Image: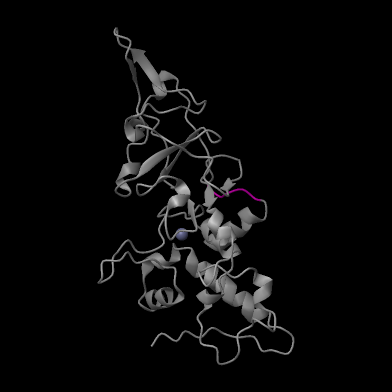
Amino acid sequence: MARKSQVTHCLSGGHLVNARSNENPNIFCNDQFAEEVEYAWEQFAKDATGAEMITGQHRRGRKTGITIEEVYPHIQDIAPGTLPWWCPELGGYTFSTGLIESLCAKEGRQALTSRADAYPSTVAGSSLGLTYANFNRHVLLFPSSLTPAGTDSHSQPSVAGLVTSANYPALNDNRLIDKFGTVSCTLYHEMFHPVDSAGTDRDGPDERDANGKLIQYYAAKTIILANMAGAAQIVNAPEPYVLIALAAYMYRNPPAGKTGLFFVPNVG
Ligand SMILES: [Zn+2]
């Protein structure tokens, strides 16, 4: 099933395709569901019931157990500074990249979706009768993403507001479609991450530009140029879908008396 129909399916009350459980994916609107883990990877992992995975006790009383690193042996490879966060409500862990004080402290971000590869390794103790959390990927919308702010991306208050005669672009308007992103675009964007059947979790090609900056397919111009260059990763990045959906809506719903506008890329 194509990505867009998977998102539609989920948003219209269906479950995630290829879900890990029958529960609908959680959407959190602040980061209070996730607790800092004091000793990070070295701490004993908690099982799905919230109990530490203790395997024994030395004579001197010191416990032995399975650490978070042993339960999630691969996830540190994602990026330097990846950290676990305990989520009591989920009975498992979510992970952040970068050393941050809380999940929503990540600058320049509006939201995040948990990693596709955040699966516990059942090898690390399945024979010991430990229970492992089994939950779907979840979305975290940062509180700041819910308040339209200035001209940031996804800052327009509503989709309906774009197609009023006051806001609809004039014929000679040369703004690209990303200038019209709405607050709701953030959730729509995130929903494309958990249905990423390739499991790439990526917003770009994992490459850096000539200035060493990570290339990310957020801006319309970047997306258009990447598409013209035949970039393969573009089909896994969410924002191209978001911008096409937005452009299609605006084209099909011009205010009374106005002509529907195509967004012709001016990338010269
Ligand atoms: Zn993204």
Which residue corresponds to the image point at 50% horizontal and 69% vertical from the top-left?
A: 152
Near-viewer residue (58 or 127): 58
Near-viewer residue (7 or 210): 210
Near-viewer residue (145 or 194): 145
In the image, is residue 178 above or below residue 97?
below
In the image, is residue 98 above or below residue 159?
above
Which residue corresponds to the image point at 33% horizontal and 10% vertical from the top-left?
A: 61
Q: Quadrant of residue 130?
A: top left
Q: Quadrant of the C terminus?
A: bottom left
Q: Residue furthest bottom?
A: 172
Q: Quadrant of residue 6?
A: bottom right
User: Which range of residues does the magenta coloring cover?
Assistant: 14-18
In the image, is residue 88 above or below residue 160?
above
16 falls in the magenta region: yes
Q: Position of residue 145 (x, y in %)?
A: 55, 59
Q: Position of residue 240 (x, y in %)?
A: 48, 69
Q: Quadrant of the N terminus?
A: bottom right
